[in-house]
Amino acid sequence: MNEGGWSVESVSRRQTLHCRCGKGEEQMKFFSSFVQDAFTSSGHCVRMKMHSILLSSALLCLASATARAGNFVVDKSQSELAADMHASPSHNFTTVAKDYACDIEIDPDSLRITKATCRFEFEALDSGKDSRDKKMRKWMNIERYPEASYTMEKLTATGKPGSYLAEGVFTMHGTSLPLNIQVRLERTGDEITLTGESELDHREWGLEKVRLLFFSVDPLLKPRFRLVGQLKESTEDV
């Protein structure tokens, strides 16, 4: 039987079920005792048992793929995810994400980023001024749109060692749009540092310019990050 990437092969009194998920092909083997019992039952029972095997194995593959995280472990005590902003009357301020989650995969040999996703909740943003943060959360309508995320889709070397252009999608306020980030990767011993910066106009994501009497905030934001961490050893699922 071969259907949708699944196949069942009868080998003597053993059944081998192949499921393709992630990068490679994983095999889950159901040996003689289980299959022998299945095939000594009626034809209906055989079909029911085989359907159960396929369903259970599909769920195992899905769980395995979902649980597989990137190998770059971020040390948040040394890292920062922030955005710089300008307001008038003229002054600058920075909003920092007090908590965030990044799923990043880096090839240990080439030190090339192969996967990157980061997300944060707006509730976790801190500009150093409580009254400003409360207004920001109301402006963002965080009850309806509680988080933002970025997913890298392509990485291109810029010609300088360790420098890349990451092309991806940034989702905020219910809108997903392309966003490019200038990324630099450096390694010192076992420690890896990822830095990046970009610019975006939040009006493109459906957020109006902030105005209050003579006060306003420039809609051009400058998100940036510095992620420090190490690579954990990859293990193959058995």
Image (tube, rainbow, N blue to C red):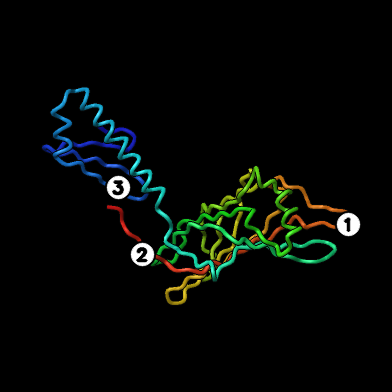
The local crowd at label 1, few if under 14, some if 14 to 19, many if 20 or more residues have their Cα within 10 Å, is few
Image coordinates for residue 187, horizontal then vertical, percent:
47, 73
Residue furthest to the bottom in view is 189
Q: Disc 1 marks which residue?
A: 214
**Quarter-of-image position of residue 134:** bottom right
The local crowd at label 2, few if under 14, some if 14 to 19, many if 20 or more residues have their Cα within 10 Å, is few
Q: Residue at x 77, y 57 (%)?
A: 218
Q: Residue at x 30, y 42 (%)?
A: 19
**Quarter-of-image position of residue 226:** bottom right
What is the three-letter code of the residue carrying label 3?
A: Glu
Give residue 174's mark: none
Element class at badge 2: loop
Q: Disc 3 marks which residue?
A: 25
Give residue 233's mark: 2
Indicate whether 11 appears above or below 111: above
Quadrant for the N terminus, please: top left
